[in-house]
Structure formats: C-alpha cells, structure tokens
Image (cartoon, rainbow, N blue to C red):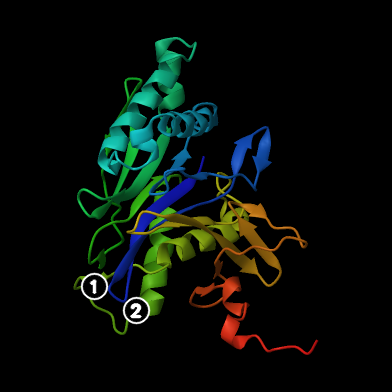
C-alpha cells in the first residue's frame, strides 16, 4: 500500500501544486526504492496511486501512451478537467480486460486509489482529485483532507490517499502545533501549507519500523507543478549523505541539476545546485 498526498503551496503571492509519496511496494517482501509518482509528458499534471500494483503500474504506462497518442491531449489543448474524464476511460478499459470473476475483481480493487492533479488553463486553478472504484468501475471525485482541530487550511487543498490516515493526521497536527502555536486555544487556527505535509510524511517514514507501520517505507518522493503548466521532480535529502529521486537513492557518481528539498533541517530548505554555477559576469578572464 502507500501514502500519497497533494496540496497547493502558497508562498509570497505565488502558488504551486506539490505531490508526495512514500517509496515502498510490497509483494514477496518490501522494496523501498520504487517510483510511485508519474509526471505526465504534457507537463501540467501527475498521477500517483495506492493499492493493487497489478493495475496501477500498467495504468501508468497506458495513460501516458494514450495521452501522448492524441495531439490535443499531448499538447494541453485538452484542459486538465477533461483529461480526468479521459483517464477514467483508460482505467475502465484496462480493468475490463482483467480476466477475473467480477466479485474477485471488485475485491482486488477495493483499496485501489489513483491520485490525479494538475493546472487547469480554463479555470485558472489547480485541480486535485481521486479515482476510486465502485462496483468495478472507476469514478473521479474531489474530496479534501481534514486536518486535526483546531487546525484548518485557509484555502483547502490537501488530498490524501492510502494507509495510516489517522497517524498522518496526528503527525501533521503535532508539527503545526510545534511550529505555529503560541498559546493553547480551542478556536480555529488557519494556515496555508508550505512543506508541512511532506515533513509529516517523512516523520512517519523515519519511525515506521518502530511504530509498526509496515505498509509504508523508503524516502519521500516529491514533485511540483507550476501555474504556467510545467512540472519538475525534486530530490529529497534525508540525511547528510543520502539523496533520493523518485524514491531511488542517488549513487555517489551522480550529479543532479534538480532542486533538492533538505528534510534534515528543522524547517525544510530548498537547495539549488545550478545556483552555484557562476554567471558570465562572474567568470574571470584567464591568460592565454
């Protein structure tokens, strides 16, 4: 299973959609370096999942190839709201080809969810929702996650799928209390999320063995989608010498140009490797 979540980060008058997930897949044992986020080639939307990988991994491939095969879905001429309907059609076609009795198929799909989100050029806002199954058929719904009282999002956006919802809510609430609470109060307190949801996920992953949370593991994987329609994966730093991209630990010989979210700090700090490359004005003239 999984934890996957997405929210709209608001900072200094701008906003961006962030999606995060753990990196564990289970079958015969657990593998903790598995990609569970997919940035679609069109650049303005993503997929993530929880549940049966026998459906979800083929789905990733089929959705990508289907959208890339048609010029309107490949070039963003089709808005994200309409793309959601087309993805539902791809999922239902794939599920219908599954050679299982209907009752068995429904049981297998009971815990399967697909998280989808992106930037709508038509509505000029981010859209986040979840594909789930009712009687074997996929339906797309928009349902926001509720943070523990007294905390509330000023602009509700957080969507959560997967396991350990109560544990995630507790971790997020504790983080908000530590960072923003100046006094005890029963009144509502409103926040706009920065990186707090992925911080809470990281806390659960660090304590998953000790806390008895076997269905999640590995490092957080992270990606962003911007209002101008482009997307970007981020590297996550979980210790002084460990860096992960899409859940995979980077080798010592790898050099990444991607931004790095440093989760070892008390407040996550984005690092930009390209910022260390001098501009032309900073290059000194050498003697020949």
Percent coordinates x, y for residue 83 in the rendering: 31, 36
Quadrant of residue 90 in the image?
top left
Q: Characterize the local packing of mark 2: few (<14), some (14-19) or many (20 or more) Cα atoms within 10 angstroms.
A: few
The residue at which mark 2 appears reads as: 180
- Reply above or below: 269 against 111: below
- Reply above or below: 79 against 168: above
Query: What distance separates the C-alpha of mark 2 from that of mark 1?
Result: 9 Å
* Picture residue at 46% right of the left edge, 43% below the top: 41
- Reply above or below: 192 against 124: below
Percent coordinates x, y for residue 178 in the rendering: 40, 77
* Picture residue at 53% right of the left edge, 44% below the top: 36
The residue at which mark 1 appears reads as: 189
Closest to the observer, 150 or 102: 102
* Picture residue at 78% right of the left edge, 90% below the top: 287
- Reply above or below: 195 against 81: below
| Residue at the farthest right position | 288
Closest to the observer, 58 or 41: 41
* Picture residue at 48% right of the left edge, 11% below the top: 100
Closest to the observer, 155 or 109: 155
The answer to whether residue 164 of the structure is visible from this angle is: no
Q: Characterize the local packing of mark 1: few (<14), some (14-19) or many (20 or more) Cα atoms within 10 angstroms.
A: some
Q: Is residue 88 left or right of residue 1?
A: left
Quadrant of residue 169 in the image?
bottom left
Percent coordinates x, y for residue 11 in the rendering: 33, 73
The answer to whether residue 187 of the structure is visible from this angle is: yes
CB under 8 Å between callouts 2 and 1?
yes
Q: Dot 2: what SS? A: helix
Name the quarter where the C terminus is drawn: bottom right
């Amino acid at each position: 299973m999984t934890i996957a979540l997405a929210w709209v980060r608001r900072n200094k008058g701008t906003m961006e959609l962030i999606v995060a997930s753990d990196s564990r897949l289970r079958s015969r044992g657990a593998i903790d370096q598995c990609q569970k986020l997919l940035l679609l080639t069109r650049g303005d939307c993503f997929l993530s999942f929880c549940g049966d990988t026998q459906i979800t991994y083929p789905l990733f491939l089929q959705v990508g190839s289907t959208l890339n095969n048609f010029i309107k879905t490949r070039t963003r001429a089709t808005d994200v709201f309409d793309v959601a309907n087309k993805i539902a059609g791809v999922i239902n076609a794939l599920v219908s080809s599954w050679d299982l009795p209907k009752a068995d198929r429904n049981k297998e799909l009971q815990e399967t969810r697909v998280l989808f989100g992106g930037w709508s050029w038509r509505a000029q806002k981010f859209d986040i929702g979840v594909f789930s199954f009712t009687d074997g058929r996929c339906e797309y719904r928009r349902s926001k996650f509720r943070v523990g009282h007294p905390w509330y999002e000023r602009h509700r956006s957080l969507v959560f799928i997967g396991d350990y919802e109560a544990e995630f809510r507790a971790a997020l609430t504790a983080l908000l209390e530590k960072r923003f609470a100046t006094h005890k109060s029963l009144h509502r307190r409103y926040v706009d999320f920065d990186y707090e949801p992925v911080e809470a996920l990281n806390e659960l992953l660090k304590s998953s063995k000790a806390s008895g949370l076997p269905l999640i593991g590995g490092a957080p994987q992270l990606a962003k989608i911007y209002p101008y329609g482009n997307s970007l994966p981020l590297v996550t730093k979980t210790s002084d010498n460990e860096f992960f991209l899409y859940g995979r630990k980077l080798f010592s010989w790898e050099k990444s140009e991607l931004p790095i979210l440093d989760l070892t700090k008390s407040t996550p700090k984005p690092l930009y490797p390209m910022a260390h490359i001098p501009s032309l004005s900073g290059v000194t003239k050498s003697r020949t």
